[in-house]
Image: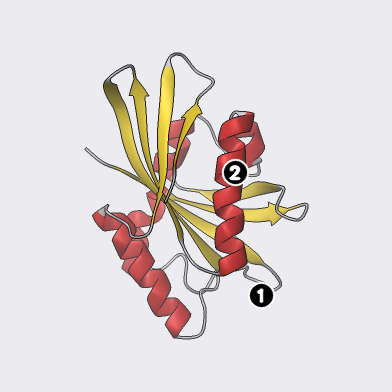
Amino acid sequence: MGLAVLKETFGELVDYYERTDLPRHPDCLTLMQYWEACIAAGGFVVGRDIPARPIARLLRNIILVEPVNDATDFRIRLAGSMVRQRFNDEIKDRYLSELRSPEDFKHRRDAACDALRTGRPAIIDSRLRRGSVEEMHTEVILLPVTSADRSATWLLVGIFYFG
């Protein structure tokens, strides 16, 4: 898939962002396999399939988002402790557009809309660099899931850190 360079709004950091077909991070792979098993058994439903014992150790890395306004933005419904720590704040009930630069938000929204449209995972490899120094390497997976009331498709987002 294509490589896009996104400039973050803080400091001299540049995010080298690439869509991939398969997860590389072991926890990302575990989450995707659990999601696939739930889909094969009739669907992944919030409240029934998450939280769940098989992925309990991954919950700190998970965000649950609800598309709003025809998926022009995403409301954060649940955020694990590792994600809250990354943002240095409680992000529940905030909108993704508030947390990202406009260019970065556009790329993340496009990946989310692809997952919603296709019903398949979207996987993003992200390398945050300051010059030639890699500050952070993450893999993000976006998985379409059914809301608890079964009225809408939301996204389960896993953010996993390398190193």
Q: Position of residue 94 (x, y in %)?
A: 65, 40
Disc 1: CA contacts within 10 A as few (<14), some (14-19) or many (>=20): few
Q: Is residue 88 visible?
A: no
Tell me the residue at 42%/30% (across/down).
15
> N-terminal of the two: label 2 or label 1?
2
Where 61 falls versus 86 (above or below)? Answer: below
Q: Which mark is residue 92?
A: 2
Residue at screen point 72% across, 48% down: 72
Residue 96 screen position, x and y as percent: 62, 40
Q: Badge 2: how crowded within 10 Å, few (<14), some, or many (20+)?
A: some
Residue 28: image location, x then y, percent = 33, 56
Q: How is the image coloured?
A: secondary structure
Type of amino acid under label 1: Arg
**Does dot 2 land on a helix, a strand or a loop?**
loop
The residue furthest right is 69
Name the residue located 59 percent from the left edge and 28 percent from the top edge.
101
Q: Is residue 59 above or below residue 146?
A: above
Q: Which residue position is annotated with label 1?
A: 150
Q: Is residue 130 above or below residue 45?
A: above
